[in-house]
Image: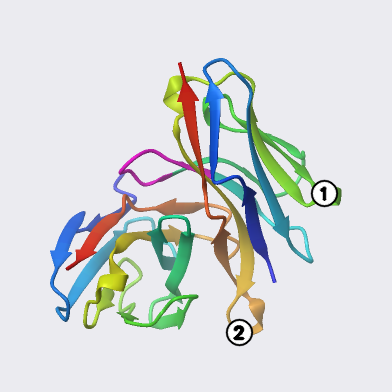
């Protein structure tokens, strides 16, 4: 079974500081991995995704994540936080589902709320 | 581009009432799904569909019903609303079974009193 663990339900950083949001997954096969961002009272926006190929993935708004198979991790980073980065972030992994495991569903972590202090 | 459209955006229901959350996509995607989002729980799958006429249950299907009569539409029905169904609901669609490219609607905020 695949699951996603986000370490830290709330992360607080100062403006200009490094952002590190942690995500670990459990999977018996290489999964597809995603990071989504959700601003207050809005829907989900895809930040970046890993499917195959290069393990360092660059996304929007200066975020990037590295797929580390040996550590089963997909941590999200940004070198310098902006006030506009304050939001909730969700890590997600595809999971086979349905009869014969022929279809997918996204399994989400419980989210990490990022606050950015001036 | 409309993408995935959900209606209504906000709704207040009384316990025991029924209602339907509408979801439509204009991308000719085969795969559609409904999630609910609750504080501290992330998003959990309610029901999903892999094509017109085919639906199946997700993690938390109780109290909800779906149908898929067309490729475009995937309505979610609350049969008899309960306060525990107060949540934010998201519809999603994808063209591939791996979820490589998935599009979410803007969400529907539902309160059951």
Residue B13 position, x and y percent, is: 14, 69
Q: Residue A30 is drawn in which quadrant?
A: bottom right
Q: Position of residue B58 (x, y in %)?
A: 48, 76
> Where does residue B48 sit, x and y in percent of width and height?
44, 73
Circle 2 residue: A99
Instruction: Locate residue B14: give its quadrant.
Output: bottom left
* Res A102 visible: yes
- Residues in magenta, as a range: A36-44
Left/right of residue A68 with respect to residue B52 in the rendered view: right
- Closer to the camera, A23 or A106? A23
Label 1, secondary structure: give it: helix
Q: Quadrant of the C terminus of chain A?
A: top left
At horizontal 60% and vertical 18% (from top left) the residue drawn is A17
| Crowd class of label 2 (few under 14; some 14 to 19; many from 20; radius 10 Å) | few
Quadrant in which the N terminus of chain A is drawn: bottom right
Q: Name the residue located 34 percent from the left edge and 77 percent from the top edge.
A: B68
- Secondary structure beneath disc 2? helix
Q: Position of residue A42 (x, y in %)?
A: 33, 43
Res. A71 mark = 1
The answer to whether B28 appears left or right of A89 in the picture is left
- Which of pointers 2 and 1 lies earlier in the amino acid sequence? 1
Pick whichever, B111 or A36, lies toward us.
B111
Residue B97: say if magenta: no
């Amino acid at each position: 079974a695949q699951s996603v663990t986000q370490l830290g339900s709330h992360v607080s950083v100062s403006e200009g500081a490094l952002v590190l949001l942690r995500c670990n997954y459990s999977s018996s096969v290489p999964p597809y991995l995603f990071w989504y961002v959700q601003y207050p009272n809005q829907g989900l926006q895809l930040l970046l995704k890993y499917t195959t190929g290069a393990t360092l993935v660059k996304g929007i708004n200066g975020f990037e994540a590295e797929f580390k198979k040996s550590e089963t991790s997909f941590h999200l980073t940004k070198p310098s936080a902006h006030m506009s980065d304050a939001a909730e972030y969700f890590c997600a992994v595809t999971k086979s589902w349905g009869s014969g495991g022929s279809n997918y569903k996204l399994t989400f972590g419980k989210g990490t709320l990022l606050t950015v202090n001036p | 581009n409309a993408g995935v459209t959900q209606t209504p955006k906000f709704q207040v229901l009384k316990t025991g009432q029924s209602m339907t959350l509408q979801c439509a996509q204009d991308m000719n995607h085969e795969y559609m799904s409904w999630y609910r989002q609750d504080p501290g729980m992330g998003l959990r799958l309610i029901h999903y569909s892999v094509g017109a006429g085919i639906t199946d249950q997700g993690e938390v299907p109780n109290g909800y019903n779906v149908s898929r009569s067309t490729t475009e539409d995937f309505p979610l029905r609350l049969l008899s609303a309960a306060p525990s169904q107060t949540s934010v609901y998201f519809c999603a669609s994808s063209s591939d079974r791996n979820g490589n490219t998935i599009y979410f609607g803007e969400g529907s905020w539902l309160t059951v009193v």
